[in-house]
Image (cartoon, rainbow, N blue to C red):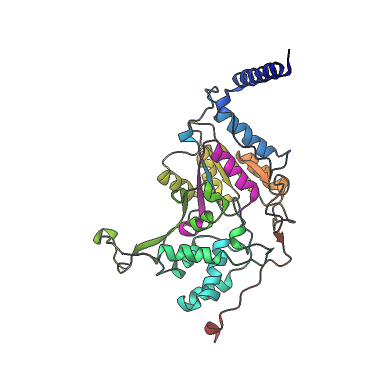
């Protein structure tokens, strides 16, 4: 037998082996795409649990667990789950401080400047602070706030070296989102940050390839047409060509806790099957996904900020992981599950935050 025929037979045999192997497992068309192998530790149990889950729910042969592609919905918190949240690198808080004290002190009240100065480590990113954010941006169009968020994102936090605020995405989570996207999942970002700002952050990150602007749910500030800010009902006027939509300074809702589950129901209209968060304010979203009335297998994951070398994490892994496991969530250790958090050029600095000085024309 000549060499050419021998190679042909070997190639045919290999093809048959692969074919029958695929049929025996799940059908070749159902093998999950991607690997999550570049930025996740090889022994990461969290990563492996997700791989196992995706393999199960994308396998058409598994009648009990298979989820049709149109129902594969994953929801992600943003700050601290997808991107850096560490104080004082928390994007929307620092944007508010800079807007009031550095970039546009002439546009805000003394009350808002005082509020910006008073923010300290351990602050609550709750409704009271969000109401001040809404007041600060009163009069801006949606596009103006979006553009300002992108402009602010070019600034560099003191808590990291060689990082802009827009450079905060966690590399393992970018890889995870891509993995889900490649396997037919629709990705939503459900953030406590105001929606327009969240859209600006996601659109200027690697996540933009997998998350559309229409799939972002965030904190809501009141918006009306310019000239009708004081009109009680939007039913009393009509949009015309060239009209501008502006923030009134009014506040609608902070997208944390139960609001996350409420707005997922309102905007998505069905239960997601995967949820990812990093704090107690995400647990309503987790529990909503894990609710026994979900018609499909569901899982929830919590990122634990336990890395104090590459990041500013202060959480205790043993305590937090035990707490999350008890609640039915899969904990993710930034210290042990993440092979790399940021690009090699980005390092944690020795200075976390220095209060900015006011602009000279404002201080005079």
Specify start and end residues of the magenta stretch as a single range. Answer: 169-198
Q: Is residue 299 above or below residue 163?
A: above
Q: Is residue 48 above or below residue 241?
A: above
Q: Is residue 193 visible?
A: no
Residue at image location 56% in from the left, 63% down from the top: 153
Q: Considering the image in quadrants, where does the C terminus appear?
A: bottom right
Seen in the image, is 187 located left or right of residue 21?
Answer: left
Residue at image location 50% in from the left, 58% down from the top: 200
Seen in the image, is 17 located left or right of residue 275?
Answer: right
Q: Is residue 244 above or below residue 262?
A: below
Q: Is residue 109 visible?
A: yes
Q: Quadrant of residue 205?
A: bottom right
Seen in the image, is 243 located left or right of residue 33?
Answer: left
Q: Quadrant of residue 79?
A: bottom right
Q: Position of residue 37 (x, y in %)?
A: 68, 40
Q: Considering the image in quadrants, where does the N terminus appear?
A: top right
Q: Position of residue 348 (x, y in %)?
A: 71, 61
Q: Is residue 181 magenta-colored? A: yes
């Amino acid at each position: 037998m000549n060499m050419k025929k021998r190679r042909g037979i070997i190639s045919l045999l290999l093809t048959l082996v692969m074919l029958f192997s695929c049929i025996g497992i799940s059908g070749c068309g159902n093998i999950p795409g991607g690997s999550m192998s570049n930025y996740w530790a090889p022994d990461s149990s969290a990563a492996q649990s997700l791989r196992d889950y995706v393999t199960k729910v994308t396998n058409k042969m598994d009648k009990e667990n298979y989820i049709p592609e149109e129902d594969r919905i994953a929801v992600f918190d943003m700050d601290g789950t997808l991107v850096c949240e560490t104080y004082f690198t928390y994007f929307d808080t620092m944007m508010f401080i800079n807007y009031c004290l550095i970039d546009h002190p002439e546009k805000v009240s003394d009350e808002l400047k005082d509020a910006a100065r008073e923010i300290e480590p351990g602050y609550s990113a709750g409704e009271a602070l969000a109401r001040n954010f809404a007041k600060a941006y009163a009069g801006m169009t949606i596009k103006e706030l979006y553009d300002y968020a992108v402009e602010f994102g070019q600034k560099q936090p003191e808590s990291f070296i060689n990082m802009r605020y827009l450079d905060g995405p966690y590399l393992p989570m970018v890889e995870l989102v891509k993995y889900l996207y490649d396997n037919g999942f629709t990705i939503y970002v459900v953030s406590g940050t105001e929606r327009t700002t969240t859209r600006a952050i996601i659109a200027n990150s690697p996540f933009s390839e997998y998350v559309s602007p229409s799939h972002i749910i965030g904190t809501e500030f009141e918006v009306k047409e310019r000239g009708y800010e004081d009109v009680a009902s939007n039913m009393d006027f009509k949009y015309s060509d060239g009209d501008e939509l502006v923030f009134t300074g009014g506040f609608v809702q902070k997208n944390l806790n139960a609001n996350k589950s409420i707005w997922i129901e309102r905007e998505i209209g069905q239960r997601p099957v995967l949820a990812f968060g990093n704090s107690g304010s995400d647990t309503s979203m987790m529990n909503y996904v894990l609710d026994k009335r979900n018609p499909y297998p569901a899982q929830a994951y919590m990122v634990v900020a336990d890395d104090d070398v590459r990041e500013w994490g202060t959480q205790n892994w043993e305590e937090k992981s035990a707490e999350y496991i008890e609640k039915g969530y899969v904990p993710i250790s930034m210290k042990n599950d993440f092979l790399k958090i940021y690009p090699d050029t980005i390092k944690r600095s020795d200075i976390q935050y220095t209060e900015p000085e006011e602009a000279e024309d404002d201080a005079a």
